Image: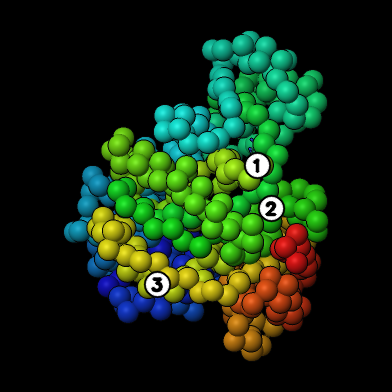
Amino acid sequence: MNILLLGSGGREHAFAWKMAQSVHCDQLFIAPGNAGTSAFGTNVDMSVTDFPAIRQFCVEQQIGLLVVGPEEPLVKGIVDYFNANPVGDMPVIGPARYGAQLEGSKAFAKAFMERHGIPTAAYREFDGNNFEEGIAYIRQHALPIVLKADGLAAGKGVLILNNREEALLEFEQMIMQGKFGDASKKVVIEEFLDGIEMSVFVLTDGKNYVLLPSAKDYKRIGEGDTGLNTGGMGAVSPVPFADTLFMDKVIDRIVRPTVAGLQQEQIDYKGFVFVGLIKVNGEPMVIEYNCRMGDPETEVVFPRLKNDLVELLLAAGRQRLDAVTVVFDERVACTVMAVSGGYPGDYQKGKPIYGLDLPVPAESLVFHAGTIYRNGMTVTNGGRVLCVTSYADTIRDAVLKSTAVLEKIQFEGKYFRKDIGYEFK
Ligand code: AMP
Ligand code: GLY
């Protein structure tokens, strides 16, 4: 069948790489894609939120499966649009708008967890109507205190504050001055959880689910987890501390109740649930939900997935995940992201990338993120430029293999962390 994938990051390169291996994949299209995805299909110059154009393309190219990579089209209702304007029996992988609020609204996600007894930090939500109560709440709250813009804020909407005056000021700026635009008209205030984070990936059809390999990403720009937050500088899978005992708790207390909650509330959800969680005194607590795969986690999760991904996605679309068993590669996979100089602050684009034609060892994979093919050259086109995933028996060896490949790929301003997985080495 013909498949259309929406998105342009390293995540989408990993999706394209994996789906192109499927016996079910005839023609693969990626909109808009990047310089890497074009090795596995045809890039299409189309916005991921132009639903009528996407639908017309699906009709013209006889697309049999539509896979949505990023959250924005989901939160904006792409699934609802195709429910109202179907293209034959083509499934769209992702939740409808209501369910996408698990990511699109922190208050929605917290209330969902509360309804289903899913462990998470204690919280309250505030907006312009109960602003003064919010001020009083902050005055008596323990420090550090966590303020979260309710809506999507490009990964910037969470503030962890150690100073009460600063927390009061930020709260006022978020609600009254639209610090994060409409996203911060409502604010969730929650208790700070101290522990180690990891990500769990679930594919659900709204009734059944399969658990994909788990992963840990490294969000900070600097080695030793210092400096500003980024979209993710690397990832490892599996997560060493997520042993069977811990994962059993995650499944019992978080994954099962989440899927049961979706079903019980009749939420139209055929797609990925990405659970960001934190291990606090040995117990898992949910930090956030996302309604899509993670980036760069996908770049280590899919390489460890032995199943045919298209088959898994079709099973999700047709509510047949009960008939699927997921098989993992036992090896470790690590990915290391190379970014543009200055990222996550200002950075330049359009820098030529050299060395992409050099042979890559059999146990390494190069996934493009912010790259574009222009005038016969691949050039940088974003903050996160490309990542290298490697398999090995240990995290240390996998990271060494990835960094060795990254040393040979050159672009002006290139930077990457050499210490991905450092706490497990
Ligand atoms: P979120 O967008 O909700 O994932 O938050 C971004 C990051 O903020 C998370 O990955 C955590 O590192 C941190 N964070 C969010 N909520 C909490 C919390 N309640 N306690 C401690 N850290 C948190
Ligand atoms: N790497 C974190 C995310 O995709 O949200």
Q: Identify the residue under disc 2.
A: 219
Q: Is residue 398 left or right of residue 62?
A: right
Question: In the image, what residue occupies the spot 57% across and 40% down?
Answer: 285
For residue 166, say whether it is visible. Answer: no
Coordinates of residue 48 in the picture (x, y in percent)? 43, 54
| Residue placed under numbered mark 1 in the picture | 280
x, y percent for residue 126 = 57, 20
Residue 101, percent across and down?
44, 38
Q: Which residue is mark 3?
A: 307
Indicate left or right for 323 with 103 as reference: left
- Pair 3/1: label in front: 1
Dot in front, 1 or 2: 1
Label 2 residue SS: loop
Amino acid type of disc 1?
Val
Q: Is residue 263 above or below residue 210?
A: above
**Residue, x 75% and y 26% (percent of image)?**
143
- Name the residue nearer the viewer: 286 or 74: 286
Q: Quadrant of the N terminus?
A: bottom left
Is tag 2's residue or tag 3's residue first in the polypeptide sequence? 2
Q: Residues within 10 Å of mark 2 (few under 14, many from 20)?
A: some
CA separation, marks 2 and 3? 28 Å
Q: Is residue 342 above or below residue 96?
A: below
